[in-house]
Image: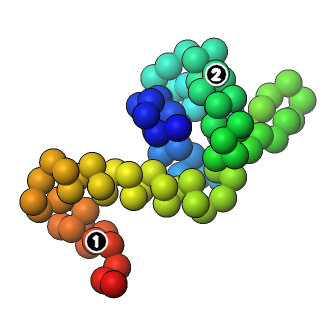
Amino acid sequence: MLADATRVRIILALRDTDEMSVNHLADVVGKSPTVVSQHLAKLRLARIVTARHDGTRVFYRLEHEHARQLVTDAIFQAEHTMSNSPQHHHRGLAEPEE
């Protein structure tokens, strides 16, 4: 699910909010509502997001905290592959010590 940049952007957009409509998500990620809807359908099948209908509008939110953490961990891992001194270590966001 994280192999597509648009899906990652959708999850990141939903990470810091309660919920968003398809049109609002489309604006945030810079894609058409149709494209965003297609990605949201895949994310729903994977149980990463859930939908709430309000009349003709559909609002999406992350299904649970694990989706939020999954993206955060993927970004941190990518930073480790790119640098010996990842950005998240300098922002006070380093992983907890084991």
Picture residue at 43% right of the left edge, 34% below the top? 3
Q: Position of residue 22 (x, y in %)?
A: 66, 28
Q: Position of residue 65 (x, y in %)?
A: 60, 62
Q: Nearer the viewer, residue 29 or 4?
A: 4
Secondary element type, mark 1:
loop
In the picture of the structure, the residue carrying the numbered disc 1 is 94
Q: Which disc number belongs to residue 24?
A: none
C-alpha separation, residue under disc 1 versus residue under disc 2 = 34 Å
Q: Quadrant of the C terminus?
A: bottom left
Q: Position of residue 73 (x, y in %)?
A: 39, 58
Q: Residue at 38% of width from left, 52% of height from top?
A: 74
Residue type at mark 2: give it: Gln
- Label count reads 2
Residue type for callout 1: Ala
Q: Are marks 1 and 2 in contact (CB under 8 Å)?
A: no
- Residue 23 visible to the viewer: no
Label 2: which residue? 38
Tell me which residue sits at (53%, 56%) in the image: 68
| Colour scheme of the picture | rainbow
Tell me if 89 is positioned left or right of 61 in this view: left
Q: From this viewpoint, which residue is outermost toward the bottom?
A: 98
Q: Secondary structure at mark 2?
A: helix
78 over 22 or under it: above or below = below
Question: Picture coordinates of residue 5 (x, y %)?
Answer: 41, 31
Mark with earlier residue (1, 2) = 2
Q: Is residue 97 above or below residue 43?
A: below
Q: Is residue 14 visible?
A: yes
User: Mark 1 packing: few (<14 Cα in 10 Å), some, or many (20+)?
Assistant: few
